Amino acid sequence: MTHTVTLIPGDGIGPGITEAVLHVLDMAEVPIEWDRQLAGLAALDAGQDLLPQPTLDSIERNRIALKGPLTTPIGAGFRSINVALRKHFDLFANVRPARTVVPGGRYDEIDLVIVRENTEGLYAGIEHYIGMQNDPRAGAESVMLITRFGSERIVRHAFEYAVEHGRKKVTLVHKANILKCTQGLFLDVGREVARDYQGTIEFEERIVDATAMALVLDPYQFDVIVTENMFGDILSDLAAGLVGGLGFAPGANLGEDTAIFEAIHGSAPDIADQNIANPCGLLLAACLMLDHLGLPDSGRRIWDALRRTVVEAKVVTPDLGGTASTHEFAAAIAANLG
Ligand code: NAD
């Protein structure tokens, strides 16, 4: 069966790393037909909106997309195109696995997953200035929005992910000791959901600051972490740092019936058009996508080839200490496909 996937190459280094990823996927003979669409600066250059309607229609049709990084031009009226996409398709779960690719780093064989709520919390962006006397910006206030609905669906998503992927434990991370209402609600709902999985998946709860320290001291005690938006943002970058940085960090934005896969890094304007960007983040995102499409064997094969190439360290891009171009790196990965 051939799957149709919306492909958004993005801008900056996006088109270069996308071509590299397509080369590896072609060589691995994955049964995918690409529906190419524009967004971001590439769309503006083509005389379209930052987030053109045909791109939204394509994702609506295919329900799955692989996306390169998108620059958000300053003053474009968008807080972020990525946020706009998440909102449009109600992609409430941001799933970021942190898995060691290169052995010999600070920690070997890390394999944990952070499931971050993507729509609520402080990042809902409900904020305003408070004017006092002659100063219109004397203060500022931001609202941490937490709902029973949003908490229930993200914690359930984490447990379902754990069941589907043979994981053993879900850790709910919160700050309910201080934020009694918002974080307290998140924790209470999480405990209720956890009861449905008693005997199948272990459940534990931890406070966010202690979790940050525990992740650095002994990351092996974690399996699946579920948390609200901002804590998830911070902890998932921390976890990416444990496995070698953002270059090896893929992410999935998941809704009830739509999924968008992407690298975590941005469009890297400082090295755009130099053909030296590392394609691994987007390639790992493609591996997550293959898993989601029910093609885990293809995903594993590509993951193994990527790891072999990076460990050999002969043909890698400058960020990994090599001299290879983006395309040469991808060709080396493709040559290592078992
Ligand atoms: P960035 O991730 O683009 O770059 C940070 C640093 O990492 C730069 O020095 C860059 O050269 C390097 N880098 C990033 N990806 C690399 C790769 N694949 N290979 C080698 N080096 C790489 O972050 P930024 O500079 O803060 O953001 C640039 C633009 O990207 C902004 O407009 C931002 O809004 C956007 N952005 C988009 C996404 C997304 O589309 N998901 C995510 C983050 C940032």
Image (spheres, rainbow, N blue to C red):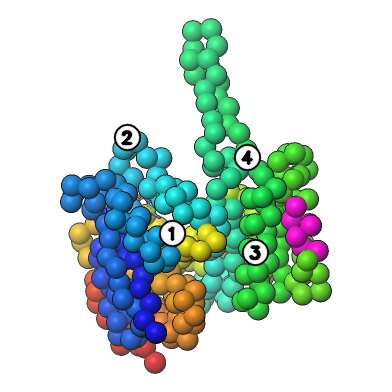
Numbered circle sitting on residue 145: 4
Numbered circle sitting on residue 264: 1
Residue beneath the point at 46% across and 76% down: 293
Q: The C terminus appears in which quarter of the rendering? A: bottom left
Q: Nearer the viewer, mark 1 or mark 2?
A: 2
Residue beneath the point at 29% across and 68% down: 35
Q: Check disc 1: other Cα within 10 Å, few if <14, some if 14-19, many if 20+.
A: many
Amino acid type at circle 2 is Gly
Can you say whether 137 is above or below 37 in the image?
above
Q: CA distance from mark 4 to mark 2?
A: 26 Å
Q: Position of residue 112 (x, y in %)?
A: 60, 69
What is the quadrant of residue 77 in the picture?
top left
Q: The N terminus appears in which quarter of the rendering? A: bottom left
Q: Which residues are magenta?
A: 189-195
Q: Position of residue 124 (x, y in %)?
A: 54, 41
**Considering only order in the chain, which callout, 2 or 3, is on the residue closer to the N terminus?**
2
